[in-house]
Image: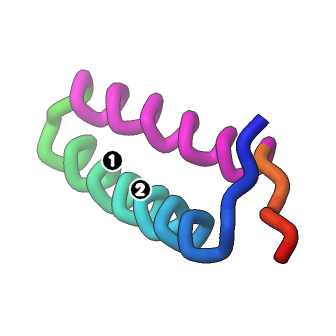
Amino acid sequence: MYRLDDRQRKKLESIRKALVLQIDEAARDGHDLLAHLLEMARSEVSAILSDTPRAKH
């Protein structure tokens, strides 16, 4: 199991937010497969964030 420090956690959270925006844009533009693949990536990032404890300082 990995431990994320605050910097890593913030970076993953910003990646997740960016993925959400890209998913919306791809779906709006009719790129269903791309939207699906981006959703899979977003799901993985969310799983990492929810399953990974914070690093202790």
Q: Are marks 2 and 1 in contact (CB under 8 Å)?
A: yes
Relative horizontal placement of residue 35, taking residue 29 as reference (left or right): right
Per the image, the residue denoted by label 2 is: 20
Q: What whole-number distance in Å separates the C-alpha atoms at marks 2 and 1? A: 5 Å
Magenta span: 33-51
The secondary element bearing badge 2 is classed as helix
Of 54 and 18, the residue lying toward us: 54
Relative horizontal placement of residue 9, taking residue 36 as reference (left or right): right
> Residue 32's image quarter?
top left
Give the residue at x 27% y 54%.
22
Q: Tell me the amino acid under the disc marked 1.
A: Ile
Q: How is the image coloured?
A: rainbow
* The stretch drawn in magenta includes residue 50: yes
Residue 34 % position (x, y): 22, 30
Give the residue at x 48% y 57%.
16
Relative horizontal placement of residue 34, taking residue 16 as reference (left or right): left
The secondary element bearing badge 1 is classed as helix
Per the image, the residue denoted by label 1 is: 23
